[in-house]
Image (tube, coloured by chain):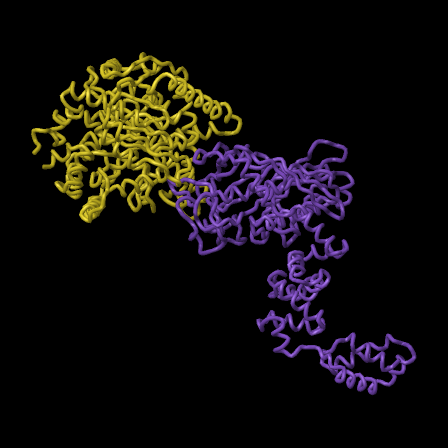
Chain colours: A purple, B yellow
Amino acid sequence: MDELADYDEVLAAYEPVLGLEVHVELHTASKMFCGCDNSPGGEPNTKTCPVCLGLPGALPAVNEKAIESAIRIGLALNCEIATWCRFARKNYFYPDMTKDFQTSQYDEPLCFDGHVDVEVDGVTHRIDIERVHMEEDAGKLTHVGGQTGRIHGADYALVDYNRAGTPLMEIVTKPIRGLGAQAPAVGRAYLALLRDLMRALDVSDARMEQGNLRCDANVSLMPKGSTVLGTRTETKNVNSLRSVEGALTYEIRRQGALLAAGGRVKQETRHWHEDGGYTSEGRSKEQAEDYRYFPEPDLVPIAPAREWVEALRATLPEPPAARRRRLQAEYGFSDLEMRDVLGNEGSLDLIEATVLAGASPAAAKKWWLGELARVANEAGVDLAAVGLTPAQVAEVQRLVDDGVVNDKLARQVMEGVRAGEGTPAEVVAARGLRVVSDDGALAAAVDAAIAANPDVAAKIREGKVAAAGALIGAVMKAMRGQADAARVRELILAKLS
Amino acid sequence: MTPSVLRLTAAELGARIAAGELTAVEAAQAHLDQIGRVDGDVRAFLHTDAEWSLAQARAVDARLAAGEQLGPLAGVPIAVKDIFCTAGVPTTCASRILEGWRPPYDATVIERVRAAGLVMIGKTNMDEFAMGSSTENSAFQTTGNPWALDRIPGGSGGGSAAALAAFEAPLALGTDTGGSIRQPAAVTATVGVKPTYGGTSRYGVIAMASSLDQPGPCARTVLDAALLHAVMGGHDPMDSTSIDAPVPPVVAAARSGEVRGLRIGVVRELGGEGYAPGVEQRFHEALDVLADLGAEIVEVSCPHFRYGLGAYYLIMPSEVSSNLARFDAMRYGLRVGDDGTASVVEVMRATRGAGFGAEVKRRIIIGTYALSSGYYDAYYGSAQKVRRLIAQDFDAAWERVDVLVSPATPTTAFRKGERIADPLAMYMSDLCTIPSNMAGNASASFPCGLAPEDGLPVGFQVMAPVLADDRLYRVGAALERALAERWGGPLLDRLADGAAGTYLGVATAEGN
């Protein structure tokens, strides 16, 4: 195992400098350079054609929808959009690349010089974007046999080219400095922001666990007061928000230990192990690979008309951070409440939709972060897949507001809806969940409870109103929960005053 | 009947078939028989399959019988350079590395040729991956020049040119990266046209150098080449570099042959030292013919053409090194050294070592070097600058003239083996043809006589601006008519009615 230095001690002596390269798979209908189905999965090698298989003679043709998505991403990241740029070939031999070169972009990216702001613990950090360029994804290799299931020791490898040619955007930051101890958290926040942005733009599913969004995290340590960048490492396989924070923290501590011991950091690619929470040595990068880039002669240059770019700018959604600020203000959520919302994947979208369907922001938040978050957690599914739509949640809340059900009954209604028993109203009817609002029946139950608990009744008569809880509980139990607790309290206090 | 059918032009064959005087099956059979008779010596074909060809011919006859309008070349046999992907039919590029590979798809040009009712008669020999000027770089066989079988038929499309000159096919498909259509045409007295870059689709044509490659027609007459050009040409969305414009009026130009008032520029730099006297003589005689027909002849200087060959031999290998990377044994073609213990890299290495010939390896190595970090600017970058300068030379010339002309090759067909050990001498064969590939303009070679010193054909090159391909045909047709009058018939008649023709079984005396 690597020696790890104390995080705070490293930060006392060094300034971490980050560089994040994020790959985003676009969810266009067809692939980057051919008409093949770009949806994920499928029987291996069924979503292929001569072009994405790189057969002799086949030629690429650019998917205009992918260019459109790329420009929209660039605009959302406040980038300049090139007036003229070309694809380039990145040459290297590897069996997952059918042509043994990747059609990518080199010194003429489509989008460049952008920036985006991320907020961590109330501090806003500006992240400068170096470039956003287009390329194609490779096929998928599966190493079979051997002990590790990894490339070394494998008996053979299978390759699936369904993914070959999927449009891929590479978003590269400039070196990010001045983050101090927040560096790992900023890395995480930046990744979360990109994820939200890709979804808001509707250009990618941006599911990290599916590999739609992949991050290579570069980090180096610069002695405080110095202006000379340290040697960096590039950590791959960083496939979740938690991973990026963990990998950056680990590398900062590992590099810190090396430097403290008088050693030097080796420029290399490292591999993040999610399970163990550590990085391990990968390919050495001391000898830079020579990809022999040159302009792709099979494609014509891309020269997006300015009118088109401006038309696309008009389609941009509200930036996620601005939207969050707006909704927080509109809903009157405290910072603490907002943090809870943001901590629950997808809940802001669901709350917003529930509010639009008529519920109050507080009620919408209560359901999505309470009962439904619990159910989703138990079922191991995303909140959005919990089996209730925002409209249905709003309808349940309406039933509560109208006094038809109380919160406890509302949970049962939700359970019924999730079980496919119909609309909330239908579930109420079918299950007989309506609260009892007949004061006669309630009064009888109240009388019975007072009679059965003379001691408690006496205390209340003496003014100890808090003791009413025990009587309310007894009444609710007798009514099998189908009573409005507030009304029961009123009746008890009226009898005993 | 056979000799006379073989001597027909494609236009005449098509007309006879359309008139019902001849069937596509009969035409195909006559040419298959000719291949059977002479190809053991000429060796123009890498692959023939009588059943494949006859099935196409039967289908064409059925379509014609059903009243379908298929155009003037329906039923005409065509030889196909083995660089075009033909669905289900072996396509090797004359390389061991693709031996036995059957593409699952047709090149766009092949689709168009099929749709027009042409009947593919076989796949022709070539230099491996189109790299060479003699067809000696084929991994499988060397092809003889029907004018003298111990001479090269040119390259890389020597198989297609030899098939035409041996009357094994009236039409052929070629590709031209640095002269691979025009130089074989020149040394076999046939017609070869490199269309404007982007004028014909490259989709399904196995790439050598993407920015230079261009498929084109090969024929025995100017009109036949134009008819085939019209079938092949036009926009293809599958090829991003294909031009979205109508095919220039090539057939009308070939029928007209009018050159009165046409301004013809003779490229000063393409002649003189290093050019065979007989080549120069016939070239200048052809110029006189055109002047007599009313063309205006002027001399034009294109000072950067002299750097064309050097720049070409950087740009072309650079693209080659990338385009040929995919032949890695993983998905198709040859696989060597896969013994269950060798790694992927070892298998790739062994396969490429065994599967590529010497010239292919030479170019991959040169190209890999030229693109590598630290050398890119000096080699690939400088070569691209030269390329722009050559294009500027052309642009300046078009201000003054309508077409440029030169000999198509500095010499006539050399002997087999003469230059194979001397790559630089071999590369010189493409000196005159390369500038048009670098600039992307249209260019062609037309027969203009036999060199007095060796009795071998000389080619007359015509170059026209981008998308002015019709001018090539105008000049070609004028020359063809005037020279036929002078010689008493097409130049290839000299071959057909001479000793070679007797051997080939096509002499007129044996006809009818």
Q: Left of B279 or right of it: where is A123?
A: right
Nearer to the camera, B501 or B192: B192
Where's residue B83, x and y in %? 32, 37
Give the vertical position of A462 relative to B359 (above or below).
Answer: below
Nearer to the camera, A43 or A31: A31
Q: Determine the image quadrant of residue B110.
A: top left
Q: Determine the image quadrant of residue B36.
A: top left
Image quadrant in which the C terminus of chain B is located: top left
Where's residue B375, x and y in %? 50, 25
Q: Left of B330 or right of it: where is B135?
A: left
Res B125 seen here: no
Image quadrant in which the N terminus of chain B is located: top left
Where's residue B413, x and y in %? 25, 22
Res A40 seen here: yes
Where's residue B300, x and y in %? 36, 14
Give the vertical position of A441 relative to B46 (above or below).
Answer: below
